[in-house]
Structure formats: C-alpha cells, structure tokens
Image (cartoon, coloured by chain):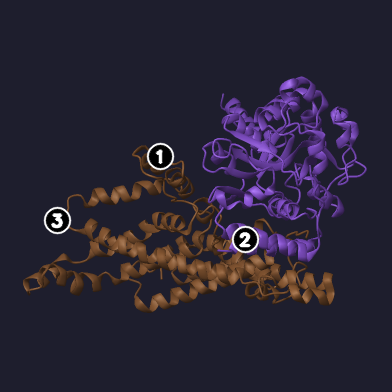
Amino acid sequence: MIRNLTLPWWAWILMGLCLCGFVALVVITVRRNRGMKRSLFAAPYTLWMILFTVLPVLLIAYYAFTDANGAFTLDNFRNFWDSNYESNKVILEVMGEDGAAYVTRGTVNVDTLVYSLWMAFQCTLICLILGYPAALFMADRHMKLGSTLVVLFIIPMWMNFLLRTIAWMSLLEDSGLINSFLKALGFNGVQLMYNSGAVLLGMVYNFLPFMVFPIYTVLNKMDYRLSEAAADLGCNGWQTLYKVTMPLSVPGVISGITMVFMPSVTTFFIPRVLGGGNTMMFGDLIESKFLTEGNWNVGSALSLIMMVLILISLSILRKADPNGEGGGIA
Amino acid sequence: MKKLLALVLALALLLPVCASAEEVVNVFNWEDYIDESVLEMFEQETGIKVNYMNFTTNEDMIVQIDANPGAFDLCFPSDYIIERMIANGQAAEINFDNIPNFNQVMPSLLNPAYDPDNKYSVPYMWGTVGILYNKTMIPEPEQSWHILWDEQYQNNVFMLDSIRDSMGITLKYLGYSMNTREVPELMEARDKLIEQKKSGVVKAYQVDETKDKMVAGEAALALMWSGDALYAIDLNDDLDYFVPIEGSNIWVDGMVIPATAKNKENAEKLIDFLCRPEIAQMNCDYIRYSSPNVGAIELMGEEYTENATINPSQDVIDRCEFFNDIPAAMQAVYNSLWNEVKNAK
C-alpha cells in the first residue's frame, strides 16, 4: 500500500522532454518574431500549463495503466467495467470453488457514470431553459434593468461555491428556513433535501451563470439593426426571435452548454452536501477511490475515462460552432 | 547612516531565515479533536511551532501519510489502523523516557491487542459506537440495532459514511463478529444495508455534519461515536445515547509517530504535554470523548464518572468489541460491498 512518488526513469525523461520542448518553443517563437517579442508574453502561461495541466494529465495516464507496483496493466479499466473485479479475485482466492456463488459483476462504476451523465444532461437543459430568456432580457437595449441584472448575477459568484452550497443546506433542511416558514403557516413540512432533486438544484444554481454569460455576450454584440430590419420586413416579435436572434446566438448557446456540461459531469461535493450522500456522482466516486480507498490506479483510470468522454462531447459540440464564435471554449 | 540602514535591512532579510529554522511539529488529527488553545499553550511553553492539519476518516489519514512521507510528525489513528501501521513499519518506536506522563494512562488500556508491547502508541481518547436519538420523537427506543431498520422511522436515520463502522454494526446486528472475514457474512451485511436504504429509513450518509443536524432536530436517530453524541447532548437536552444490547465497537484513538517523521523529539514532547492531567482534562471537556487519563478523570470528578455516555458501565464494555485490522485484500471486498450500498437506489 505504501506509495511513494518515485517515478520510473522514463517518466523523468518525459518530464525533461516537456521542459526542453517548452524552452525550444519559447526560443523558436522569439526568433521568428524578432522584431516584436509579443509571443514571449505567452511564455508564463505555457509554463504554467505544462506544469499544472500537461504533467498532471501524463501522471494520471501513468497511474491508470499501472498497478500498485508500477507494472503495466489494464486491470484498472476492467475495474471500471466490473467494480467487483478486485474483490471477486479475493473471494475466489479465499473461498476457492465455493466462492463462485458469490462472484458477480459489479455495476457501481458504470451506473454512477450513466447517472452523472443523466444529471449533467438535465442540469444543462434546465440551465438553457432558464438562462436563455434571462440573457435575452439582460441584453435587451430597451431594458434599463439589464445592467443591474448582470451585476446581480455576478455578485453571488464573488462567494466561494462551497459556501453557497452549504448555504442552500440551511434553506432546504427539514429544520431549515423554508420548512420552518411552511410549518409556521400551518402546512406540513416537505422533504427538500437528501435526494437527487436537491443535487440538481444545487448544480443548476452553481452553473447557471456559465450558461447566461456566454449567451448574453453574443446577444449583446449582435447588431440590433438586424432585428429592426426583420420587423420592417413584417416579422412579429416571435418571428424575429425565432428567425433572427436565435440563429445568431447559437455560438453563445454552444459555449454555454459546454461550460455547464463539463463541470456538471465532474460534479462532486454537491451530492454529498445536498443529496446527503444517498447518491454518488462520478466525481464522488473518483474522490473516494483516491482519498478513502487509496487506490490511485483505479481512480486515475476512472478520471481518464471521464476526460475522454468530455473530449468526445466537446468535439461533437465543436461541429456546431466551427469558428468558435461563442468564446471558443468548445 | 546609509551603512546603518543597509545593516538593518540586511538583518531584516535574515529574520525570516531565522524563523524558518525554528522548531516545528506537524500534527495530523481528526476534525474537531483537540481544544486548540492547548496547542497555543504548548507553543508558548516550548517555543515549538505546531502545524495543525485535519482528516475526516482513518482511511483518509492513512492515504495521506503514505502519499506525503515526512509531512507529519504526530497522527491520531484508531486502534485497527495503529495495528496496520505497526505491521507495515509505518509507525516509529516511541522513546518513553521522553514521556514521563505516560504513567497517567489507565492500566486497562496498556499493552492493547493492537500494540501488544505498547511501543508505538499512547492512548489519546476512547469511546464506543452507538445510537444517538431524540427523546421527543422516540420516548422509549428499542435497545437494539434493529431500531435503525424500523420502517416506522421513515427518513429519520443518519448513517455513518464510514465503511468499518456501518458494516461493523450491521454485522453485530446479524450476530456476527465486527471483524469477520467470512464473505457470506459480509454479503449478508451488505444486503441488510441495502434493504435499509431501499426501505427509506436512511436520510443521509455523512460523518461530521451529523452531530449539528441532530442538535437541530433534523432526524430521530443517528449512528454515532460516543463523543460526538455527548457533544450533541450538551447542546440539546432532548438527545440521548445508548449502546445496543447486541454489542458494538469500542475503540481507542492513539497518538502515533509516523516512521517518516522529521521531528520525532518534538512529537514526543507534545505527546507528553497532552498526557498531562490538566491538559488531558481540557481536551476531554472540549471533545467530550472518554479520557484514558487517570489524573484527568480525577480532576473531572463525579460529573464525568456518573455520565453513562462518556463512562460506560463494565457490562457495556464487555459487550463491545475492538476492531482488528483487516488485510488489504479483504479491504477490497469491504470497499466494493460498501460501494454497492452507496450505489443502491
């Protein structure tokens, strides 16, 4: 179980190569643009990215394809498919032939992933349904309230998301604010927390701004004369919205969907706080692999699978916004 | 004048260097598990700086110690983890010459099964696992683990999100040992826990949040450690605690110096300090677990000895069982069974 961070020789070489590559990149770009050294400005960020994005991903890949002793293995991915893979081996070892009756395929990991994707899908959909009209309203030139609304949307984001989530707890609890109010009015209390509905609420609440702002930015930049022209040519308000505004806002919508879907799939902590740990999302599962079970290898394999899934969904989205007009996140 | 200024500046630059050379001790303890003013007193008395860090469960702690060798000088694992650390060579032998206050430790807790020669650990706190309940919601609770499965208490039970504890009491309820390695028994416990979850009595699986929620009257029943229970009872008179008749877990959290510790002597000084009766009393008053410190118990007097939660009677202790460490392979079975419970809908 003892895990020290001594890496195999090739990992050090890989890291060395990364650093050399970085230096080379900087030297080449500086040489090419001898006159203006603007590209040098990108150097700090590139270094940052290599240290904190590229290297960690390489480490995750390393752990995902090795066992506790550092030897190459694909068992971690078998573990994803069959969450009982390890324990079944132990059972057969301890009980011999009698153990066969106790061996079943564990579906925990796959179930949790499917559940996370389903939750993320619902969260994104709700954010879109709530966020699009909000963005439309905020971007409306005739609306004096628009800029106030923008500020109101931003202010809660000044607070850490953990605190905001815990604050929801004191609202939703059985002995919380909402239920105390209902009981004071003579109603029966309602169970608002400890279920997936509460988790979804927490996710929508936390991620809604990521949907609203990209759409708002696109709508705000849109040439309003286009909708005036549409009105001149006989479109009513709904037709303008549906034939002019909406198609023009697609890049913002794509960007918003991406920015909500990604953190939604990887959500953790919210299910534990608002869902009372009754349901696990994929992020919680990965966390428990690392922190509770101390199984970095399976944890890394699960992370890698999730990263690949996110990459696939990003590339699908990219097809819908090939020019990256909505901020180019996709 | 300029020279003087330069000298002052140079000295000012040196200061942080001196500061970094000062003595430190890196302490890794459970959340809410010390009266932090004790640490300040220790710093003032000895000049050793305490870096204080927290963990939530034993499993989290051991993972951190493995991953960061040398980062911790003193940790507070439970009995079965102490057993594992000793077996894996992760615990350093303590030099008891540096701990004169060791003579304050209750004789019954010396040379325990998890550390037979008492070379690696000093008891810090001990307690039981039981049920905290709300008297206004349940005036006369059934003194059995069955109450946690009673469907009359829909949505009214907090379980511990801690593998050994939740599996352990279920095994006890089924009449097995908490330390069983028999797969059929473990599977029966898993099925029992899934049945409990599906019947809708479980409100949440959590650890540190439970005590405050019980104080707020959020649920009728909670599986809980005796100290957390007492903390909650102190804040809300409607709460009470009992250890079910089938028996339960009795545990000791000890002070252990990891083998990789860099400041072993400072850690020993801190252990000795924490074994001082007055200091042990302060911690006991704050944490509300049972103290292993004879001197501290004397100082606390009747209020302590007459409280059944903190000072359980001998027949309760006799019904309880210590956890033994389970081998790594068996942990994989425990883990996957527990994950199936968590995943059940």
Which amino acid, mark 1? Ser
Q: Do the residues labelled 3 and 2 touch (CB within 8 Å)?
A: no
* Mark 2: secondary structure: helix
Q: Mark 2 lies on which chain?
A: B
Image colour for chain B is purple
* Mark 1: secondary structure: helix
Which image quarter: residue B254? Answer: top right
Structural distance between the alpha carbons of marks 3 and 2: 59 Å
Which amino acid, mark 2? Glu
Quadrant (top left, top right, bottom left, bottom right) of the N terminus of chain A = bottom right
Q: Mark 2 points at which residue?
A: B195
Quadrant (top left, top right, bottom left, bottom right) of the C terminus of chain A = bottom left
Image colour for chain A is brown
Q: Name the residue under label 3.
A: A142
Position of residue A150 in the picture relative to residue A274 (left or right): left
x then y, percent, for residue A57: 59, 67
> Upstream in the sequence, badge 1 or badge 3?
3
Q: Which mark is residue A180?
A: 1
On the same chain, marks 1 and 3? The answer is yes
Which amino acid, mark 3? His
Res A295 seen here: no
Indicate whether A291 appears above or below A84: above
Structural distance between the alpha carbons of marks 1 and 3: 41 Å
Q: Which residue is drawn at 83% across and 47% down?
A: B91
Indicate whether A66 appears above or below B275: below
Q: Which residue is drawn at 24% across and 50% down?
A: A147
